[in-house]
Amino acid sequence: MDRQADPPDVSSAQSTGTLRVRPLADRTGWQAAGEISLATRPAWERALNRLALEDVEVCHLELSAVTFVDVAGVCALAVAAQGLPEGRRIMLEQPPAALGRVLDMFWPDLPGVEVVSR
C-alpha cells in the first residue's frame, strides 16, 4: 500500500473540534493532531482502519499534538489493536496522559499496543 500516493480522507471539522491525521514521512504510520471526540470519531476510526491495513510489524501513531481523547476514542483504538494479526502492534508515541490511563484501566493486558512517552 502506497501511503504517500493514496492519503486517507480522515479530516473532520466540527464546531466542537478538529482532528487532522497525516502519514508519517519517516516510518509507517500516522500523526494525529486535535481532538478525538464524538465530533471527530469517524475520522479517527477511518485512520485506525487504514492503519490496520498496513502490512508491517509495527505501525506508529504519533499523538503529541492530540489535545483531548474521549473514552470511546480509546475504545476504538483498543478494538483496532484487538483486530491486528498476531505479532503486529501499534506503537503510540507521546499520547495524551488520559489515553494511557484509560488503556491501563479498561485494557490492562492489551496485546498489540505499546505506549512510548518521550
Image: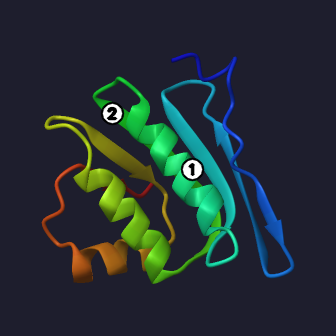
Q: Is residue 89 left or right of residue 38?
A: left
Residue 83 visible in the displayed image: yes
Q: Is residue 87 above or below residue 106?
A: above
Q: Is residue 11 above or below residue 55?
A: below
Task: Measuring from the top left, give residue 91's x and y in whole percent.
Answer: 36, 46
Quarter containing the C terminus: bottom left
Front in this rendered view, residue 11 or 90: 11
Number of numbered tags placed on the structure image? 2
**Residue pictured at 67% horizontal, 20% vertical:** 4
Residue 59 in which image quadrant: top left
**Residue pictured at 58% horizontal, 16% vertical:** 2
**Residue pictured at 40% horizontal, 61% vertical:** 77
Q: Amino acid at mark 1?
A: Arg
Front in this rendered view, residue 59 or 77: 77
Q: Is residue 115 above or below residue 91?
A: below
Task: Measuring from the top left, give residue 49's x and y in whole percent.
Answer: 47, 45
Residue 97 visible in the displayed image: no
Q: Is residue 42 left or right of residue 74?
A: right
Q: Is residue 14 left or right of residue 81?
A: right
Q: Secondary structure at mark 1?
A: helix
Q: Classify 10 Å Cα crowding around label 2: few (below 14), some (14-19), many (20 and above).
A: some
Q: Secondary structure at mark 2?
A: strand
Q: Classify 10 Å Cα crowding around label 1: few (below 14), some (14-19), many (20 and above).
A: some
Asked whether the beta carbons under mark 2 and mark 1 sit within 8 Å of each other, the answer is no
- Residue pointed to by mark 2: 58
Nearest-to-viewer mark from 2 and 1: 1
Q: Earlier in the sequence, mark 2 or mark 1?
A: 1
Q: Which mark is residue 46?
A: 1
Q: Amino acid at mark 2?
A: Val
Task: Measuring from the top left, give residue 82's x and y in whole percent.
Answer: 23, 54
